[in-house]
Image (cartoon, rainbow, N blue to C red):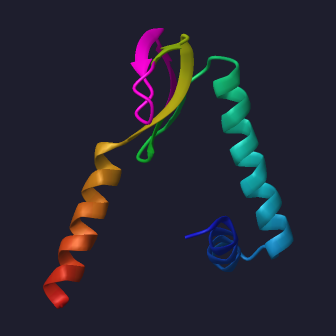
């Protein structure tokens, strides 16, 4: 599903125009990015948690040349799905597979 598909589905579900819905979705994405850039986590109950993890510097290897490369310390965004979310996906896929 692309962002355009998401806009279509949400706009039909909430009764907003596609343009209004796209603005809301963009606003949500930008809010998440800004919070993570500021070192804050976001917890959405029943959905999941966005956090930033610090990765230490390390020595790596270029797989093409075999040359050793230094990778500096950096931060990566992570997302952990809630138990409820995982359970709903599992249940939905199991039911779908039973019908096939």
Q: Is residue 97 left or right of residue 3?
A: left
As rendered, which of 5 and 12 lies closer to the eye? 5
Q: Is residue 65 magenta?
A: yes
Question: Picture quarter containing residue 45?
Answer: top left
Residue 73, given in percent of the width and then of the height, sits at: 54, 10
Q: Is residue 30 left or right of residue 36?
A: right
Which quadrant would the N terminus be assigned to in this image? Answer: bottom right
| Residue range highlighted in magenta | 50-67
Which quadrant would the C terminus be assigned to in this image? Answer: bottom left
Q: In the displayed structure, would residue 11 be above or below residue 29?
A: below
Q: Residue furthest bottom?
A: 100
Residue 64, given in percent of the width and then of the height, sits at: 44, 36
Q: In the displayed structure, would residue 22 be above or below residue 18?
A: above
Residue 69, given in percent of the width and then of the height, sits at: 49, 16
Q: In the displayed structure, would residue 10 be above or below residue 77?
A: below
Residue drawn where x is 35% and y is 43% of the image: 82
């Amino acid at each position: 599903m692309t962002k355009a598909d998401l806009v279509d589905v949400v706009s039909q579900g909430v009764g907003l125009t596609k343009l209004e819905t796209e603005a809301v979705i963009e606003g949500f994405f930008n809010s998440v990015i800004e919070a993570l850039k500021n070192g804050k986590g976001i917890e959405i109950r029943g959905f999941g948690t966005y956090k930033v993890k610090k990765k230490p510097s390390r020595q790596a290897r270029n797989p093409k040349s075999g040359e050793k490369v230094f990778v500096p310390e950096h931060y990566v965004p992570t997302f952990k799905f809630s138990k409820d979310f995982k359970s709903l996906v599992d249940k939905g896929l199991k039911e779908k597979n039973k019908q096939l």
